[in-house]
Image: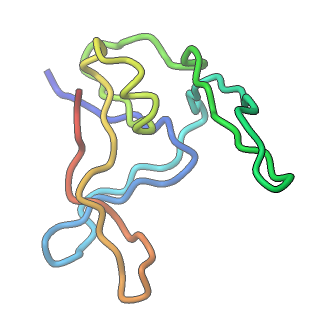
Amino acid sequence: MTKIFKNCTPHTVNMVDDNQKLVLSIPKGDVVPRLAQSTEVIGNVCGIPLTATVFGEVQGLPDSEEGVYFIVSRLVMTACPNRKDLVVPNEVVRDADGNIIGCRSFAIN
């Protein structure tokens, strides 16, 4: 069976080789899963609130599909340890100015 990638991020994902040559470009997705989150004030220093972000359930994650890997954020992948079809861009490659131009691989749960 052929495997495909579906991009569930708001950015185009570019795969590059060791010479920074574009190998595959996966357009940004229409569906972008996120973790529900809230902010709790946990203290105050000199009038400045100290807060903690509390993450909740994943929202908007598509159901598994045979032969499909979903490209998601690392937060979403980490929140779904039993989903073996979620990947995140890994081995990020930057240009001389520090801008991300692509990645060399996908990390998987």
Look at the picture and state if 93 lies above or below 48.
below
Quarter-of-image position of residue 59: top right
Q: Residue furthest bottom?
A: 96
Q: Taking 54 as reference, is 92 left or right?
A: left
Residue 78 % position (x, y)? 36, 27
Look at the picture and state if 43 lies above or below 24.
above
Residue 24 % position (x, y)? 29, 57
User: Residue 30 or 85: which is nearer the viewer?
Assistant: 85
Q: How is the image coloured?
A: rainbow
Residue at 58%, 24% in the rendered image: 55
Q: Taking 88 as reference, is 63 left or right?
A: right
Residue at 58%, 46% in the rendered image: 10
Quarter-of-image position of residue 67: top left
Residue at 13%, 20% in the rendered image: 1
Residue 89 % position (x, y)? 32, 48
Residue 83 % position (x, y)? 30, 15
User: Residue 86 or 48: which is nearer the viewer?
Assistant: 48
